Amino acid sequence: MQMSDFEQNLWDYLVSHKTPVTVKKMAKYYICSESRVRNALDKFVERGIVDVTKLGQLRYYKVKE
């Protein structure tokens, strides 16, 4: 599984946080667009390494345990 530098940064962030995070929070943290973060997180979900939970209209991402 090959990751870009940006994807690796997102992965490290997800692993270091115990609580689920939103796309908006990660985009603000890395100062980049929400669509870029969302695309990377969707790849993680497809690979089966990240869980997504939807509460209302917000989606929360967390590393699978």
Image: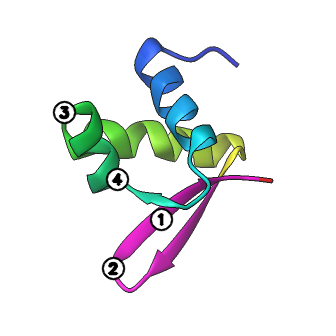
Amino acid at circle 4: Val
Q: CA distance from mark 1 to mark 3?
A: 19 Å
Amino acid at circle 2: Gln
Instruction: Tell me the element at label 2.
Output: loop
Are the residues tagged 1 and 4 within 8 Å (C-beta)?
no
Amino acid at circle 1: Tyr
The residue that mark 1 highlights is 60
In this rendering, the label closer to the viewer, 2 or 3: 3
Q: Is 57 situated above or below 52?
A: below
Amino acid at circle 3: Ile
Q: Which mark is residue 31?
A: 3
Instruction: Tell me the element at label 3.
Output: loop
Which label's residue is closer to the chain start, 2 or 3?
Answer: 3
Q: CA distance from mark 4 to mark 2?
A: 12 Å
The residue that mark 4 highlights is 23
The residue that mark 2 highlights is 57
* Magenta highlight range: 51-64
Q: CA distance from mark 1 to mark 4?
A: 8 Å
**Observer-nearest of 16 and 47:** 16
Are the residues tagged 3 and 4 within 8 Å (C-beta)?
no
Q: Residues within 10 Å of mark 1 (few under 14, many from 20)?
A: some
- The image shows residue 31 at horizontal and vertical percentages of 19, 33
Verify whether residue 58 appears in magenta. yes
Q: What secondary structure predominates along the stretch shown in magenta?
A: strand
Which label's residue is closer to the chain start, 1 or 4?
Answer: 4
Q: Considering the image in quadrants, where does the N terminus appear?
A: top right
Q: CA distance from mark 3 to mark 4?
A: 12 Å
Q: Residues within 10 Å of mark 3 (few under 14, many from 20)?
A: few
Q: Residue at x 54, y 39 (%)?
A: 43
Which label's residue is closer to the chain start, 1 or 3?
Answer: 3
Q: Residues within 10 Å of mark 4 (few under 14, many from 20)?
A: many
